[in-house]
Amino acid sequence: MLTILGKETSINVRKVLWTCRLLDLRWQLEPWGSGVRDPNVPEFLALNPNAQVPVLRDGDTVLWESNTICRYLVARQGDSTLLPADPLRRARVEQWMDWQATELNPAWRPAFMALVRHSDRFDANDVADSTRDWNGKMRILDGRLTRTGAFVCGDDFTLADVVLALSVHRWRMTPIAHERLPAVEGYLRRLESIPGHAEYCRPGTP
């Protein structure tokens, strides 16, 4: 059985749990993370020196970085719908996964941490800048969804949608001024039909 170290309130842990659900994998969640069990201890740092969740244990295999774990699990199961075998189609999926991690996530961090997590590390100017940048990234996604008319990489739901759906939900639930993005709103409605969406994309906190 797979062991996932983390907590369900973590957006990155939920990516992995949702992927497991879609692949019909059995797993156990070992609670770690802020407010649960401090990862800054030798036991955890031996698994992930970054002291971040999630961490995956699969027998003797240990992996960290949520998008990498999701890709591993899909490849492990040989699923070519969530992660296509064709090199170009796979690259398109991974392109949007990387965009989520390197472009979208940094944009939302100050606004989310200040307004939802109530961190005092960010002031009003940080929140305003973050809100502007976050909406700007969401316009990019809205443009992409306008072109596909369905999911991020076309007609089929893929691993790119697993990671992006969670970020889109976070944008929708954070108390900022949201731009009107019709394609994103339609995307959120389509996601509701995907197995596991209710459990992992909308667990009660952004």
Image: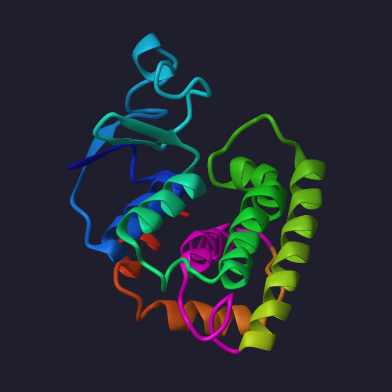
Region of the chain picked out in magenta, as a range? 149-176
Identified at 30% across, 65% down, the residue is 22
In the displayed structure, 73 sits above or below 187; it is: above
**Residue 165 to residue 68: above or below:** below
For the N terminus, give its image quadrant.
top left
Which residue is located at x 82 percent, y 43 percent? 125
Residue drawn at the location 72% of the way across and 53% of the way down: 103
Magenta stretch encompasses residue 73: no
Q: Most extreme residue toward the front, as rendered?
A: 86
**Residue 153 occupies which quadrant of the picture?**
bottom right
Q: Position of residue 174 (x, y in %)?
A: 57, 57
In the displayed structure image, the side of residue 206 where residue 110 appears, left or right? right
Vertical order, 177 against 191 (above or below) = above
Residue 131 in sight in this render: yes
Q: Nearer the viewer, residue 84 or 193?
A: 84
Q: Is residue 187 left or right of residue 16?
A: right
Q: Position of residue 45 (x, y in %)?
A: 43, 17
Q: Residue furthest top?
A: 42
Q: How many marks?
A: 0
**Where residue 101 appears, x then y in whole percent?**
62, 50
Query: Residue at image x 28%, y 63%?
Result: 23
- Residue 180 shows in the view: no
For residue 196, which quarter of the picture? bottom left
Q: How is the image coloured?
A: rainbow
Q: Left or right: where does residue 140 sit relative to residue 203?
A: right
How far from the left and from the top, in percent, is residue 67? 50, 49
Residue 139, compared with residue 203, is above or below; it is: below
The reply to whether the magenta stretch includes residue 172 is: yes
Quarter-of-image position of residue 194: bottom left
Q: Report the front residue among 178 and 5.
A: 5
